[in-house]
């Protein structure tokens, strides 16, 4: 027992006995314990007195303590009969079965996930299908004579002598762990590195820099009113040091470490080592063999506790480092099959089952699943099926699709079930309580997946959620509800949707509470594994179809829970096993039934009738679909079953409003039947029934198939002229109570308001409110409002929501399941409307001048239009496009080759802003997409990865600085021709404007055209229409960068004056500006202009040449254009490129030049400097108002001379600096260099971005004079304008000279991630 803290424990009237092995154990003796004070090591001295002997409490009154902890509610299994089933059949605990976990990755080092109940390895395979841990190891090298190899980061890697490598070849690559880490781990590592690496160096350095500056100011500046040039430089230097340290702290960003990876084959297996030391000490890094062969795993570093393993693909070309993008998958696996030998209450549902971990969440996208990962996971299932039987897949992932019955991912998922006989369990989603919120999957092409809703039991409330009162069991408020958009029920069963179970080690905890349908699905997956374990032991045949059917037919229906939340009911393992064993030889065992309803071939029926709708006839087609075997090439086994199939079915339905045939004779053919639905007499609300088909020869086995039918009957609203609203008064809400209302909003409705209030001053309530409209080919998320609100007597609670007129809307008010206590509440639902005539989006071209639209009101409404532009949206075309065949990893068995389209886009950001790349044609689709996947990666000009995104652009925005960027788009499909059609696919690069731009709105055309009085506000009565006029933006409101060809601006338009209406009712605004104003036409060229143009053109070619051609053109230019200073400047650029970062000085190296070369530069520079009258030029440049007629031409010539003078002084100064480095003890050179720098400052600022040569020369000047602070300031400026690795390396040298080793180390270690040699793999 743990040592007690300093509190009093009061235990009353327990029958206990104290022994060495148990502290409190129920026995026959009675004791009364009133106080335990742990003042000494003897925790229970004189604690137990027999019979009536007791110790009176001196602290507080006697309070009973219940020490019988309800452990079975932590990871619930009793509710579904698992505990009694395993007690009855202890060997049917999943042993002999394999569960594949499609999730965020499973930690094989987590508690309960090391071994099965039979002592075998629990996690037998581990793959990251997303690609986030892929390392390109295509580079092959051999060991040097010193026993080292050079990694791609440039570091020397010491190869341990203990390594066995018969070939002597090593494959090298780079791993970026921050791309693998979950966000919480990344944040934890960043905090640690900031505190223990950055702060320990930065704070003393900053304090020291401030101290030196203050000492200089007090000892020198304050005593000398006029500073010498040396003192001025020193003051500037000390100020620069403080400034660069301040900026370093402000701009500090931890990009993360970069680890060299070394891959080699030891003769038996591939092995990989990761240099986590970042200094080449391979012996200290993890060395792992392929997980499939060795089952080896280790944590990446001691700090992150991230369990990694490795796989190798393409004969060593790709190293796959497997981590986890969240702890979700580990928690899921622990629920399904965790095993604790000494604590059975912590076991998962099937502790004997083995696990295959297939990561489909991509850590680069914050754990979002991708099409690539899903397809690869399915391919892996197909490949592994050749050597083992994979029995169950659990997938606690999903999104909401815009339409059902389509999509490449859905097709592949169905193939795994239909051809490989795998039972696939999926979570329904956590997007309730509105109906039709079930996600995809299970809402895919065929209803073969086992969708699971989330149930909470009283035991869970007490143990896992620590609620102060037990409530009745039921569905969680947030659990997604059926039906699917096409009428399919979506859920097969429900199961406990919460558990305290093991989590990944990187969380630094052993277990935690997680809830959701993500937790319900693995419970059912474990149930399926246990069932299959028993069926295998009894040698009883089964199929994924029979498993699903019997789970449904055996489920415990919960009368107090809606059918859309529970499917067929709470899963019941014992009854399911009974049905599977009793009816294993039925004709339909290997058959699923395709249900196609109505003209859309839906999987069920979902009706949203209007009040005056007549009875409706719906055709339903039922067709048996047989389980195929992937290894039966000619389907011989299936053909015999198809030939012999024939069933006589009795059709049954308990709803009087559904009329159906009584019988159906079904053979291996599609059989149509007709259903009639008469919904006119149904009361308002949601109604459900199911047409169940029973085998007339054996009805007791349950329905063979079901046709789900849902009818959403609207509540009539008051007819005009009454306001369209609904009121409910004094409604009693108990915990988990749900009130659903369906309305057909008037055509003019555009928003609604839910108002909730209570007069109960003693109680308040938490409510989950959900409003939703299902529009054709749009997901449930497109038109919804979902929010948790509190309702009390202090003030009414108001919630606005968007409305589309004429489309059925559901308004759900659900008292949160864990909100204890009853509340009597009243509420109203009001509909409002200010409807424009342009639909959901206003498109306005500047060429129109004035955009007119009409607004009509549903009821008396205040109108106050506001139009704002927030984004610039340039469209870019690919600069390069290629299609490649992917490797064996991306071939769907038996031989479906997947191809990859790779489009490259280049664009420029003129000013720092937030950017969102949008591939409009492929956006917002995943499971329903006709392509396997799409993903983009955004890089800066140095190939540093800035952001990654996929099909959901709203999730992925990135702040970018000014500069050039490259976007690489990856799209995959097995049809090359379809990819070829996307080779010119445009991408929209949305950029947030620095300030929103308002468009002016007017009430009349005349006011708009004259720029008169703007529209402010007006009242609009029911049925009236008002025209509004928006004027085009004047050109002075837009910069030239926002006016490119094809560029548009976007924003929003709101119409209501009411704040609630403005929040809910907004419209997209798209503005197409005109091209930028044309500059004034130049004067007609003169004959002499040709000679000048030829001269300038020739001079422009000088820096591009070298050797004899350079000298030849230089001499020719001198002869043809004597006295033209541009020739000398161009020649200087050819000899000494002014902005080449490789030409920047080193702190401890002499320049690699000769004295003669430097003197040549000085001589040529002097020709320019002497030819320019500097005093006259400076005087002319200082003229503020030049009234001469040719002032512009004179100004241009003066600016050109100023540039030449600055360039020449820069080249001369750089040459003098080199000479000083070659001959340090030369005072004449120092004086000349000082004069040169002083002359330069007359013409240009030292950090002028328009003259980059000045900044480069400034670095030479600072390095030569050992002004490291000034040098760092200039180098940072150079990096802002044009980043390069060479300039960054000079920064490292300057940091080291100042003793800022922490800054030097941080910068040095960031070089591989800032300046990689290649783009990262997808």
Image: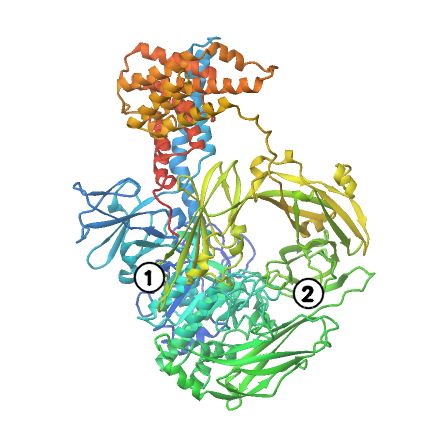
Query: In terms of depth relative to the viewer, which is nearer, 1264 or 508?
Result: 1264
Rendered location of residue 432, percent (x, y): 59, 63
Query: In terms of depth relative to the viewer, which is nearer, 535 or 734?
Result: 535
Distance in Å between CA atoms under marks 2 and 1 = 49 Å
- Identify the residue under disc 2: 808
- Quarter residue 1100 falls in: top left
Rendered location of residue 1095, percent (x, y): 43, 24
- For marks 2 and 1, the one nearer the N-term is 2
Q: What element carries label 1?
A: helix
Whether residue 348 is visible here, answered yes or no, is no
Which of discs 2 and 1 lies nearer the camera? The answer is 1
Rendered location of residue 342, percent (x, y): 36, 66
Which residue is depicted at the point 32% across and 56% down?
A: 309
- Identify the residue under disc 1: 888
Q: Is residue 700 left or right of residue 330?
A: right
Query: In terms of depth relative to the viewer, which is nearer, 642 or 1178?
Result: 1178
């Amino acid at each position: 027992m743990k040592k007690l803290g300093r509190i009093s424990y009061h235990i009353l009237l327990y029958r206990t006995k104290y022994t060495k092995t148990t502290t409190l154990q129920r026995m026959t003796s009675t004791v009364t314990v009133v106080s335990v004070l742990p003042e000494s090591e003897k925790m229970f001295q004189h604690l137990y007195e027999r019979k009536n002997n007791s110790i009176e409490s001196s602290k507080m009154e006697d309070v009973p303590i219940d020490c019988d902890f309800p452990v079975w509610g932590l990871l619930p299994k009793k509710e579904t009969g698992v505990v009694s089933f395993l007690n009855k059949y202890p060997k049917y605990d999943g042993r002999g079965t394999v569960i594949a976990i499609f999730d965020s990755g499973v930690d094989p080092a987590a508690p309960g996930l090391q071994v099965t109940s039979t002592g075998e390895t629990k996690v037998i395979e581990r793959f990251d299908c997303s690609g986030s841990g892929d390392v390109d190891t295509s580079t092959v090298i051999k060991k040097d004579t010193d026993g080292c190899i050079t990694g791609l980061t440039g570091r020397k890697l010491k190869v341990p002598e203990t390594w066995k490598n018969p070939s002597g070849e090593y494959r090298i690559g780079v791993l970026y762990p921050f791309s693998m880490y979950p966000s919480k781990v990344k944040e934890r590592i960043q905090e640690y590195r900031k505190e223990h690496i950055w702060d320990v160096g930065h704070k003393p350095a900053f304090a020291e820099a401030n101290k030196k500056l203050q000492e200089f100011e007090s000892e020198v500046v304050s005593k000398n009113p006029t500073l010498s040039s040396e003192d001025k430089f020193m003051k500037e230097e000390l100020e620069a040091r403080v400034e660069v340290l301040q900026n370093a702290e402000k701009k500090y960003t931890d990009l993360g470490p970069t680890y060299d990876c070394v891959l080699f084959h030891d003769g038996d297996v591939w092995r990989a080592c990761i240099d986590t030391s970042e200094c080449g000490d391979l012996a200290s890094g993890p060395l792992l063999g392929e997980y499939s062969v060795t089952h080896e795993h280790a944590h990446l570093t001691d700090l992150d506790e991230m369990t990694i393993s490795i796989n190798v693909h393409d004969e060593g070309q790709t190293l796959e480092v497997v981590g986890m993008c969240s702890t979700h998958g580990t928690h899921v696996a622990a629920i399904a099959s965790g095993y604790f030998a000494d604590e059975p209450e912590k076991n998962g549902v099937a502790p004997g089952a083995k696990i295959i971990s297939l990561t489909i969440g991509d850590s680069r996208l914050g754990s979002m699943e991708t099409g690539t990962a899903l397809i690869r996971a399915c391919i892996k299932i197909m490949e592994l099926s050749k050597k083992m039987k994979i029995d169950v897949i659990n997938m606690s992932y999903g999104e909401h699709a815009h339409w059902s019955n389509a999509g490449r991912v859905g097709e592949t998922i169905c193939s795994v079930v239909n051809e490989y006989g795998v039972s696939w369990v999926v979570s329904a989603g956590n997007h309730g309580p509105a109906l039709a919120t079930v996600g995809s999957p299970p809402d895919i092409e065929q209803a073969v997946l086992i969708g699971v809703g989330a149930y909470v039991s009283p035991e869970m409330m007490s143990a896992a959620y620590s609620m102060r009162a037990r409530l009745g069991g039921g569905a969680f408020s947030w659990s997604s509800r059926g039906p699917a958009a096409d009428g399919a029920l979506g859920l097969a069963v429900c199961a406990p949707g919460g558990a305290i179970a093991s989590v990944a080690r990187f969380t630094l905890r052993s277990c935690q509470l997680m809830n959701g349908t993500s937790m319900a699905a693995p419970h059912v997956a474990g149930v399926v594994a246990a069932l299959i374990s028993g069926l295998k032991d009894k040698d009883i045949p089964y199929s994924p179809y029979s498993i699903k059917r019997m789970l449904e037919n055996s489920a415990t229906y919960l009368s107090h829970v809606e059918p859309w939340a529970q499917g067929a009911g709470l899963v019941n393992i014992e009854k399911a096993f009974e049905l599977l064993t009793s009816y294993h030889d039925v004709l339909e065992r290997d058959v699923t039934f395709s249900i196609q309803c109505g003209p859309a071939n839906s999987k069920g029926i979902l009706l949203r009738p209007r009040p005056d709708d007549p009875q409706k006839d719906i055709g339903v087609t039922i067709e048996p679909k047989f389980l195929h075997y992937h290894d039966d090439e000619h389907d011989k086994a299936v053909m015999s079953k198809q030939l012999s199939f024939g069933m006589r079915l009795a059709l049954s339905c308990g709803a009087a409003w559904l009329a159906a045939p009584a019988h159906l004779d079904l053979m291996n053919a599609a059989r149509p039947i007709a259903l009639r639905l008469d919904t006119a007499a149904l009361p308002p609300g949601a109604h459900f029934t199911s047409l169940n088909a029973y085998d007339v020869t054996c009805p007791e086995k349950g329905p063979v198939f079901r046709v789900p039918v849902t009818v959403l009957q609207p509540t009539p609203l008051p007819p005009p002229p009454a306001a369209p609203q609904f009121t409910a008064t004094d409604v009693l809400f108990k915990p988990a109570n749900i009130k659903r209302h369906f309305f057909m909003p008037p055509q003019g409705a555009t928003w609604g308001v839910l108002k909730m209030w209570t007069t109960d001053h003693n109680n308040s309530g938490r409510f989950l409110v959900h409003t939703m409209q299902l529009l054709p080919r749009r997901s449930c998320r497109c038109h919804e409002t979902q929010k948790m609100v509190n309702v009390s007597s202090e003030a009414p609670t108001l919630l606005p929501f968007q409305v589309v007129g004429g489309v059925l809307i559901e308004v759900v008010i659900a008292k949160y399941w864990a909100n204890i206590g009853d509340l009597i509440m009243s509420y109203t639902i009001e509909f409002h409307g200010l409807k424009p005539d342009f639909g959901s989006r206003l498109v306005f071209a500047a060429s129109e001048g004035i955009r007119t639209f009409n607004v009509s009101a549903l009821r008396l409404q205040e109108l106050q239009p506001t139009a704002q532009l927030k984004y610039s949206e340039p469209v870019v075309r690919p600069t390069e496009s290629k299609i490649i065949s992917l490797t064996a990893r991306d071939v769907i068995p038996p031989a479906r080759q997947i191809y990859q389209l790779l489009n490259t886009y280049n664009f420029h950001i003129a000013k720092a802003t937030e950017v969102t790349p949008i591939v409009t044609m492929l956006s917002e689709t995943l499971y329903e997409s006709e392509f396997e996947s799409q993903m983009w990666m955004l890089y800066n000009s140095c190939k540093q990865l800035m952001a990654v995104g996929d099909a959901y652009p709203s999730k992925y925005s990135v702040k970018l600085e000014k500069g050039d960027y490259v976007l690489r788009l990856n799209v995959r499909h097995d049809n090359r021709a379809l990819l070829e059609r996307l080779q010119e696919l445009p991408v929209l690069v949305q950029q947030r404007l620095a300030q929103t731009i308002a468009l002016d709105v007017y009430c009349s055309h005349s006011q708009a055209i004259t720029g008169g009085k703007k529209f402010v506000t007006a009242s609009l009565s029911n049925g009236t229409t008002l025209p509004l006029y928006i004027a085009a933006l004047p050109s002075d409101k837009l910069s030239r960068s926002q006016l490119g060809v094809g560029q548009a601006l976007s924003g929003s338009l709101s119409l209501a004056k009411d704040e609630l209406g403005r929040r809910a009712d907004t419209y997209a605004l798209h503005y197409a500006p005109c091209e930028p104003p044309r500059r004034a036409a130049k004067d007609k060229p003169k004959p002499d202009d040709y000679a000048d143009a030829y001269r300038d053109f020739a001079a422009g070619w000088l820096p591009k040449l070298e050797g004899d051609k350079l000298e030849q053109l230089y001499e020719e230019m001198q002869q043809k254009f004597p006295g033209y200073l541009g020739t000398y400047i161009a020649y200087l650029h050819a000899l000494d490129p002014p902005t080449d970062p490789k030409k920047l000085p080193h702190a401890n190296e002499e320049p690699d030049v000769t004295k003669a070369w430097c003197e040549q530069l000085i001589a040529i520079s002097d020709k320019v400097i002497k030819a320019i009258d500097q005093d006259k030029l400076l005087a002319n440049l200082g003229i503020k108002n030049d009234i001469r007629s040719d002032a512009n031409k004179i100004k241009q010539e003066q600016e050109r001379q100023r540039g030449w003078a600055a360039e020449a002084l820069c080249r001369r100064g750089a040459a003098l600096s080199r000479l000083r480095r070659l001959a340090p003890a030369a005072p004449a050179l120092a004086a000349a260099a000082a004069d040169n720098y002083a002359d330069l400052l007359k013409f240009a600022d030292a950090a002028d971005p328009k003259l980059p040569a000045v900044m480069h020369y400034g670095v030479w000047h600072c390095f030569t004079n050992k002004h490291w602070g000034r040098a760092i300031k200039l180098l940072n400026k150079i990096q802002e304008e044009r980043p390069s690795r060479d300039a960054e390396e000079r920064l490292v040298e300057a940091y080291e000279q100042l003793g800022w080793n922490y800054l030097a180390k941080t910068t040095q270690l960031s070089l591989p991630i800032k300046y990689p040699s290649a783009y990262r793999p997808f």
